[in-house]
Image (cartoon, helix red, strand yellow):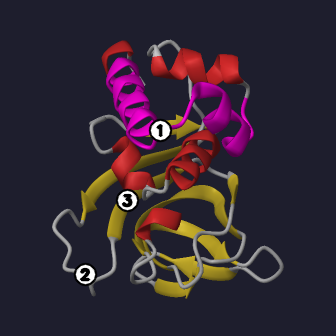
Amino acid sequence: MDKIALETLGRHLQALRQARGLSLTQLAAQAEIAKSNLSRLEQGAGNPTIDTLWRLAKRLGVPFGTLVAPVATPVEENGISVRLIEQSHHRHHDEPAVDVYLMRCAPGTVRQAEAHAPGTRETLQVVEGRGSVGPPEQPHPLGAGEIFTFAADQPHVYRASDTGATLLVTIVYARGEPSNA
């Protein structure tokens, strides 16, 4: 992320933390990151990983898309790039929250993802390339144009082939559970 994106993310992260009445120390401990790293992130001086941002969103009780929505640039880490495309903003009480991302995976990359809130599901469509996704012990192979939906309330993995992969990722959070995403 560039300097402007980092500063925007930092201000937004700080506002979300303060709105929940959490101190830097409390959020850092809950997200299992160093307080100094969280402080740098809020000041726009950090370099957050995708995993760090997921953990912060989860501990703040917001979908990942809510945390990164103000940032127009992709979040990148170790050959994986994730860019928010769309997020459900105006939900009725009985509708689930939905985030849609474009994920680009460099050849041979592997991303281990933590479990989302109970009842959360992911649907992936391969736009280009090949890969496998789903439970680490038995990921589902996919090629261009193929779609796969799985329960994302357990740890899961994204593996790109030796040619890489571009995925359209749709996360549907459990009804009434977006605060635990």
Label 3 vs label 2: CA separation? Answer: 23 Å
Secondary structure, mark 3, is strand
Reply above or below: 99 against 151.
above
Residue at left 64%, top 81%?
141
Residue at left 35%, top 65%?
99
Which x, y percent locates residue 57? 51, 49
**Which mark, by number, is residue 93?**
2
Reply above or below: 151 against 11.
below
Secondary structure, mark 2, is loop
* Label 3, residues with CA under 10 Å away: few <14, some 14-19, many ≥20: many
Q: What stretch is highlighted in magenta?
A: 5-33
**Which mark, by number, is residue 21?**
1
**Which mark, by number, is residue 101?**
3
Q: What residue type is labelled 2?
A: His
Sequence-earlier tag: 1 or 3: 1
Q: On the rendered image, what quadrant is the N terminus found in? A: top left
Residue at left 67%, top 69%?
115
Is 166 in front, or is 122? 122
Front disc: 3 or 2: 2
Residue at left 74%, top 40%?
32
The quadrant where residue 159 appears: bottom right
